Image (cartoon, coloured by chain):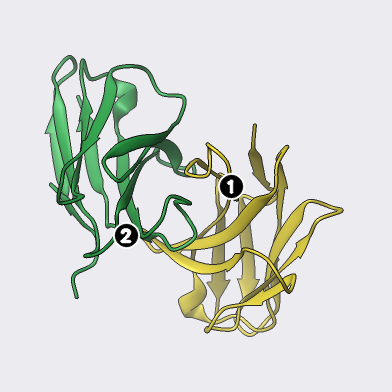
Chain colours: A green, B yellow
Amino acid sequence: DAGVTQSPTHLIKTRGQHVTLRCSPISGHKSVSWYQQVLGQGPQFIFQYYEKEERGRGNFPDRFSARQFPNYSSELNVNALLLGDSALYLCASSLGQASLTEAFFGQGTRLTVV
Amino acid sequence: AQSVTQLDSQVPVFEEAPVELRCNYSSSVSVYLFWYVQYPNQGLQLLLKYLSGSTLVESINGFEAEFNKSQTSFHLRKPSVHISDTAEYFCAVSNSHGTNAGKSTFGDGTTLTVKP
């Protein structure tokens, strides 16, 4: 049974560009949450989607957006990239809305902005 | 608002010694509590969680944590550590219900280094 898969695993972007990160949850899971983990810090909550609707939002600027598709996969979009957006972006899937109670994390996407 | 404070950023310990990683939290509502472990260049793995019931929770690899509501703490302990326990450990909280049930907060992590 496949776990949470994220793509790409690594990418390098230039300041001002746009990026799209993708996440496929575990089969049967309806909730996807996104986190940003800057080096040396804990993950910071960005969004949670449950049943294709946004159910939670962290303190991130409007340059960050996300959506969930009918198959429950999700995309995280970041516009006008800044150097400070360099981080490991983690996706977590869970059955229900309480995002951490049965959450499984992907390996993450390492984004470097130059 | 929620916050999580992991009181030690780094904990060095010798193999087979006991260890405690400390976590305090604050929240205006009832919460669920979690400990996650992260090995280098990997995602997070759930170590154990407190949702309700017994305040002492255990993992399959010998870790345990105790929920102390009066002290708002959820410290992680292991009586005898192994080299393979070397990793980053994160304490996290999430609201147990309500409109923000999906929002979670992590601490900044504790690096556990087990030395031979």
The residue wearing badge 2 is: B42
Residue B97's tag is 1
Quadrant where the image shows the N terminus of chain A = bottom left
Residue sticking out furthest to the right: B70
Within 10 Å of the Cα at label 1, are there few (<14), some (14-19), or many (20+) other Cα atoms? some
Residue A83 falls in image quadrant: top left
Residue type at mark 1 is His
Disc 2 on helix, strand or loop?
A: loop
User: Disc 2 versus disc 1: distance between alpha carbons?
Assistant: 29 Å
Q: Secondary structure at mark 1?
A: loop
Give the quadrant of the C terminus of chain A. Answer: top left
Identify which amino acid the numbered label 2 is placed on. Gln
Residue A45 x/y as whole percent: 44, 38
Measuring from the top left, give residue B15's x and y in whole percent: 60, 81
* In this picture, residue A41 sits left or right of residue A93: right
Q: Residue at x 28, y 18 (%)?
A: A63
Viewer-nearest of labels 2 and 1?
1
Q: Residue at x 50, y 40 (%)?
A: B103
